[in-house]
Structure formats: structure tokens, C-alpha cells
Image (tube, rainbow, N blue to C red):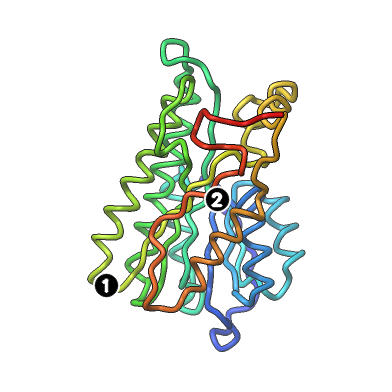
Amino acid sequence: MYLCQIDMKNDKSQNGLGVMLITGATSGFGAAIARMAAAQGFKLVITGRREERLTAIARELGEAVLKSLVFDVRDLAATQQALSGLLPAEVPTILVNNAGLAVGKEPIDQGLYEDWNRMIDTNVKGLLHVTRELTPRMEAGTRIINIGSIAGRQAYPGGAVYNASKFAVDGLTTAMRMDLLPRGIQVAQVAPGAADTEFSSVRFKGDQSMVANVYQGYKPLQAEDVADAVLYIATRPSHVSIQDLLIMPAAQASAYHFHKT
């Protein structure tokens, strides 16, 4: 079990729009959400596996960061240890379950067990670990925003286990919304299409020729596009619940239909 934390400010009176806790804040969507949320006036609790990157983000955002927690959401004990230490002023008013990844694109009969376990443990069990630890402390009027994917709506060749994990996020989001409705906690999902982040580099295990091919011939989403959608949901009036938002690049019509030039 690995855990490191960096304490920043803990004054609830200075929390502005509230406290946003973002998992997987070291890169991609998570880092973009953190930057945009800080700029809009949120106080932040940011988490991630990579201590050096998380420390750099915390330093960049300065006093906006209440706490920076280094742990792997797959590790239940580490997740419990990290999140149980949050002070009342650090419990999120907005929880962004962003940590997730795709690894490999082999057909089901050639897939690697370690890749499958990594996706399921991060995308599904990690979301459950964080949600279970935080929701008992979240109050009426707070929100949870899960980062899903077009891959959670439409399956495609070579994506079976990633598809399964994101279909699970879609189903969990719907069920969580029902479970938490009596407590006044809203639950939303942002499901992006093709986005130019570290996603493909991780999926193809650093093979840059394959990564370049993914985004060739069209303009994909940027991390900031997805962050903008998350912040839109996070800042709606309390009587407005944006429950589901599918966001695609203009050149993409489905999980496998692209217009490339």
C-alpha cells in the first residue's frame, strides 16, 4: 500500500464555489478539470498515482489546492486511508470520478489478463472504492460526475473489456443516481468520444506510430473540451440536474464512424 499526501489550506470559509475532488488529476482530463475548476474558484482535492506529476499540479495551482493525495484507486486499503483523512472542510461538494484507462486492443481470444485486470480494477472498482468512501460524508446539494466514454454506449472490435468497463460506468451512474436521490446528491456522466490525451499512448503501450494513426485526418477533442463539460455540470443551479452528456469531435458520429480528410 502506497500513500503520500501534501496538505494545503483547510479553511472552509475560503472554499468559494465549494470543494472539487478529482481522481486521476495528473494528466489528461483530470489535469484540465483541475486547472479549469481552480480558475473558476473551486478549492481542490486532487489525487493520482504519480507523485511527481501530482506535486507539480499542486504547485501550479497553489492555494486552490486544499490537499494532494498520492494513491492508486485500485488499492482499497490505500483509498480508505487517504480519504478517511479528509477534514470536514475537504469533503467534496463535487466528486469527479475521472481515473480510468484503456490498455491493449487485441481481440477477445488474444487479450492479456493483466490488461483486463488493470482496466476493470481502475475503471470499475476504483470508481466504486472512491464513491463508497466519500458518499457517506457528502451532503444534500452535492454532485458526483463520472467520466464515461462513447465506448460505454457502443462496443467495437478490440475493445471488449474496455467496453465492458465503461458500460459498467454507464450502468453504475444510473443506479447511483437512484440510490442517492433521497439524499439530494446528483449524479452525472460525461461520456467523451475521441480525445487527444495520453489515452492512446497508454492503450498502445507507447507505440507512437499507432497513437498518431488514431488522430490522423481529423481534429479530436482536447482535454479542455471535456473539462468545460464537467465544469458546466458542476456549476448549474441546485435545482438543475444535468444527468448525461455525450461529447464528440465534429468528425465523429459513433464509436466507429469518422469523417477523415
Q: Is label 1 or label 2 in front?
A: 1
The quarter of the picture where residue 133 lies is bottom left
Asked if 78 appears above or below 143 in the picture, the reply is above
Q: Foreground: 62 or 169?
A: 169
Q: Residues within 10 Å of mark 1 (few under 14, many from 20)?
A: some
Count how many numbered circles sit on residues in the image. Answer: 2
Asked if 11 appears above or below 234 in the picture, the reply is below
Q: Secondary structure at mark 2?
A: loop
Residue designated by label 2: 71
For image coordinates 39% across by 43% down, the residue present is: 125
For image coordinates 52% across by 51% down, the residue present is: 98
Asked if 60 appears above or below 16 in the picture, the reply is above
Asked if 119 appears above or below 60 in the picture, the reply is above
Q: Amino acid at mark 1?
A: Arg
Which x, y percent locates residue 233?
49, 66
Q: Foreground: 168 or 12?
A: 168
Q: Earlier in the sequence, mark 1 or mark 2?
A: 2
| Distance CA(mark 1)–CA(mark 2) | 28 Å
For image coordinates 56% across by 53% down, the residue present is: 3
Q: Amino acid at mark 2?
A: Phe
The quarter of the picture where residue 231 lies is bottom right
Q: Is residue 188 left or right of residue 193?
A: left
Q: Secondary structure at mark 1?
A: helix
For image coordinates 73% across by 27% down, the residue present is: 212
Which x, y percent locates residue 203?
59, 29
Instruction: Indicate the quadrant containing the C terminus: top left, top right, bottom left or bottom right.
Output: top right
Which x, y percent locates residue 147?
48, 50
Residue 14 visible in the current orientation: yes
Residue designated by label 1: 183
Q: Foreground: 206 or 212?
A: 212
Which x, y percent locates residue 77?
42, 49
